[in-house]
Amino acid sequence: MPFSQHLNRQGSFPARRRLGAVAFGAASVLVLAGCGASDAAGGSDGDQTLVFGLSAEPATPITGMQQGGAVNQLLTMVHRGLMTYDEKGAVVPGLAESVDTPDPTTYVFTLRPDLTFHDDTPLTAENVKNSLDYYRDPANGSQLAAGLKDITDITADGDTVTITLAQPNTAFLQYLALPFAAIVPDASLNPDTPNWIGAGPFEMTDLQEGIGLTVEKNDDYYDADDVALDSIEVKFYADGEARTNALLSGDVDMIEYVPWENFQRVADAGLTVDAQQGPFQYVQFNVTDGPFADPKVRQAVAYALNRENAVTAAFQSNGAPLDGIIIPEDDPAYDPSAAELWSYDPEKAKDLLAEAGYPDGFSATLLSTSQYTFLQDNALSVQEDLRAVGIDVTLDAPDWSTRVSKGNAGEYDLAVSGDAGVITDPSYLLNWVVDSRNFNVGWGYSNDTLRGLIEDGLRAADDDAAKKDIYKQIAEIWAEDVPFASINTREQAYAYNDRVKGFQTLPGFLVFYSSLNLANASVE
Amino acid sequence: MILFIVKRLAMGAGLVLLVLTLIFSALQLVPGDPAVLLLSTGDGGAPSPEAVAALREQLGLNQPLLTQYLSFLSGVFTGDLGESFRTSQPVLEAIGARLPRTLLLVAYATVLSVIIGVAMGAIAARRGGWVDTLVTALSSIGVALPVFVFGAVLILAFSIVLGLFPAGGYVDPSKDALGAIKSLTLPAVSLAVGFAAQIARMTRSAVLEVQTQDWVRTAKSIGLAPMAVFRKHVLRNSLTPVVTVVGIGFGTLLGSTVLVERVFNYPGLSSLLVDGVTTRDYPVVQGVVIVIAMLFIAINIVVDITYGILDPRVRRA
């Protein structure tokens, strides 16, 4: 018996120890793996590499297509057009050295000397003509076709390009400055060639499936002496939380599209949150039949919205209520009253509903999406506000893809959407008054008077007072006819650590093209 | 045994065909037009009808359904899973890049789970008392803890506060082995925690049960060292059910990577699938689902065979 006890002791200790050792070993691997950590981002002094967290894995860029924010960020790095935006958002010459406007319908661009594309082929006036001809042809599916439709003729001669317009157009140069209006080699002018080759400050050198890509400084860029960064390492972070964590942990130096719920968290960590009020949210209407065909009912909705609540709910106050339409402050048409067409007045909303023949309200469906929580939160706020005035709203919040399909098919009474002008000229509003049957436009809505006035505004190239007067009329009609009932603007932000110097976001709608300013940034 | 394997493989092939048909039909039923989505991504304008029509033509979406289905099937059997609508990359190539990453993650998590789970389960069963109580409590928490919550906590603690591990991403092990281990560790641990807890519970109860068996008593009574008895007779026999749990768990882990890859921004197969679904990138979704279905079926066959090796009675049955 004592022998057996002895054995037992001898036997059980090693057994425990061995099992313990295995567990300890496993734990050690984890700890060791984490030790000896060098800083993930950054690197040695003087290394001008910025690590940038992009909000999506971008699709392969197609020349002229609007493919969303992530693709635009990349286009701003590798491409330049005849015009571009300066650090403050003003339109300035890009590949063009100068622009002459001998009369309001003629633009003469003189190209900078010795321009080349990333593939070292020269960039000629012919390339400019070919690119612009491609962009202005609607058959190519280019988003610029509408913006460039006034062009009647483009001629290339030596290092100058002359563009003739059918009529004056105050927004023309803004369209030429867009990241998807870049001058590209003729070989890229089709939907099958990835649109990577440009004449911008950076050149795409490495693309890693699902992970990221690298752009390196283009020494042949016309302004290469002022570009401090040697390279930008772009990493893809589709999830907003993962993107924020990457910034906070130092995996990346900079992110775009900061989720609103994280603004404070990022700022509290001592990082810069560089935000601009730009994109806006709105209620759109199916006006083909039913109550919303009546402008009075649309007005009722516009008066029923408690926009302060929506801003708090959807953006944690990182936004602002919007009671009308946005006209950028530096535009001649700017008039602050255009942003105050309606107010929060539920009683007035009820009166308007009664006038329209719905004293007891009615029921309606509200299309939104569960995929973008800010749109869903806005929709919930709208739902509550409308219930309060008697409109019994059923929420329909499918994934984004389904939402787009339903929007395109008009399968809704009301919808909550978010968007921004492609350019800052108030003519961006055209998108909401022309019935082009897509998910951006209120289903069935078109207004030829508004359309005509907006086009008049474009023609008022030399007369700021006339443009202002035109937009005054537009605002008055907008208040009565309510093509959409705006809810709020949202802050759109980039965030970065203190290694990053010299970067700033562009104002208003241009915020989405802020990566243009990476050409002026450096890292410490 | 060979007949058994052949039968299993044939059944597997049938299952794959069924999965192919199901996934093809399901994608047709889901609303959302890939062409429209490809041309409009939220914060920009809407695409022109001309562009949509041109893209539908290019993607073959205007073909009759049966034609699409047959060309899909024939593609699969000739090893051509098509091209991604979004990136134009061959689907097989995308899967080829992503699958090893996900398998690496799952393998790392499995190894961690087995080591920690078996060790904890065996210690709990052998020591009993408060150790047992503690392990049981921990494993209950481990099983109940959602991976994305645990992942978020790990990121907060080890990436943001302590700065020991990156908060996410992927490092190619062939280029930077240490960097790869570091970037894999937090996602693997968050994947492993629930699974390790399950293995610990299973090991614990199996050990407790096997310890009371006659052959253990016999082994003890003939004077074998208790450690030897434990190792040869208790632990080995306890591992049979554990192997099944590991096999099934491997599949579960594969499923859990959908969340983990999202939280840790890990560019594996699951994130490819999720992106494919949200962008209605049919060829990608079909390709990934086929591969996952094949993996599941393969895992089940491997589990059956391993089970047979560990317990000869299964082979005879």
Image: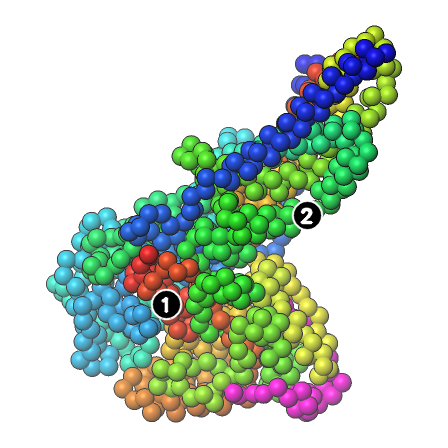
Vertical relation: B69 (above or below) B49: above
Mark 2 and mark 1: span between their CA atoms?
Answer: 39 Å
Residue B264 placement, left or right of B10: left
Q: Which residues are magenta?
A: A340-368
Determine whether the residue tagged by mark 1 lies in a helix, strand or loop: loop
The image shows residue A219 at horizontal and vertical percentages of 21, 53
- Check the image and name the residue furthest to the front: A2
From this viewpoint, is residue B60 visible? Answer: no
From this viewpoint, is residue A261 visible? Answer: yes
Residue B301 placement, left or right of B84: right
Residue A436 placement, left or right of A219: right
Q: Quadrant of residue B21?
A: top right
Amino acid type at mark 1:
Gln
Q: Quadrant of the C terminus of chain B?
A: top right
Q: Residue at x 49, y 52 (%)?
A: A249
- The foreground one among A511 and A195 is A511
Q: Quadrant of the N terminus of chain B?
A: top right
The image shows residue B82 at horizontal and vertical percentages of 49, 40
The image shows residue B202 at horizontal and vertical percentages of 76, 31
Q: Quadrant of residue A284?
A: bottom right
Q: Residue at x 66, y 40 (%)?
A: B193
- The foreground one among A47 and A293 is A47
Which chain is home to disc 1? A
Amino acid type at mark 2:
Pro
Label 2 sits on residue:
B146
Mark seen at residue A504:
1
Badge 2: few (under 14), some or many (20 or more) residues near its Cα, within 10 Å? some
Tell me, yes or no, whether dots 2 and 1 are on the same chain: no
The image shows residue A98 at horizontal and vertical percentages of 18, 71
- Check the image and name the residue furthest to the top: B222
Vertical relation: A347 (above or below) A67: below
